[in-house]
Image (cartoon, helix red, strand yellow):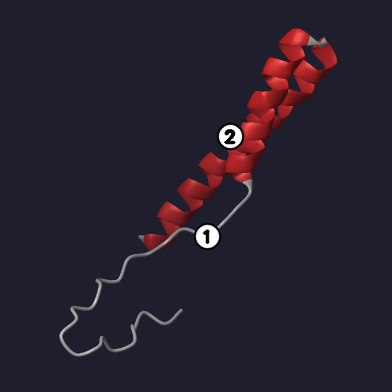
Amino acid sequence: MNDEQPPAKPGWEPLPYKHLPRPNYFPAGLAMGTTFIFWGFITSWVIFLVGLGLFTAALAGWITEILHERNERK
């Protein structure tokens, strides 16, 4: 990865370099799991369990991704 930035235009101050996390689908999975959990309260226990599983998997994946990225920077 190249940490260099293109030169700023005259009179402009360049932004400091800031590491951005990799994009992933875990936040969307967490939102879908939450939706299925609440939908399962209204409809059926099967949908509730699917939502709970999706919520748990997405949360665990997101936490793992955060910890992995934190260890990479050290």
Tell me the SS state at disc 2: helix
Residue 3 horizontal/vertical position (percent): 36, 79
Image-based side of 42 in relation to 29, left or right:
right
Tell me the SS state at disc 1: loop
Query: Residue 47 got which mark?
Result: none
The local crowd at label 1, few if under 14, some if 14 to 19, many if 20 or more residues have their Cα within 10 Å, is few
Q: In the displayed structure, would residue 55 be above or below residue 15? A: above
User: Could you give the CA–CA distance between mark 2 and mark 1, rounded to whole angstroms?
Assistant: 16 Å
Question: Contact, CB < 8 Å: mark 2 with mark 1?
Answer: no
- Which residue position is annotated with label 2? 59
Q: How many marks?
A: 2
Residue 39 horizontal/vertical position (percent): 73, 17
Three-letter amino acid code at disc 2? Leu
Query: Residue 22 got which mark?
Result: 1
Image-based side of 19 in relation to 33, left or right:
left
Q: Residue at the location (68% across, 33% down)?
A: 32
Residue 72 horizontal/vertical position (percent): 44, 61
Residue 31 horizontal/vertical position (percent): 62, 33
Image quarter (top left, top right, bottom left or bottom right) of the C terminus:
bottom left
The local crowd at label 2, few if under 14, some if 14 to 19, many if 20 or more residues have their Cα within 10 Å, is some
Three-letter amino acid code at disc 1? Arg
Q: Residue at the location (42% across, 82% down)?
A: 2
Please identify the quarter of the rendering in which residue 23 is found: bottom right
Mark 1 or mark 2, which is nearer the start of the sequence?
Answer: 1
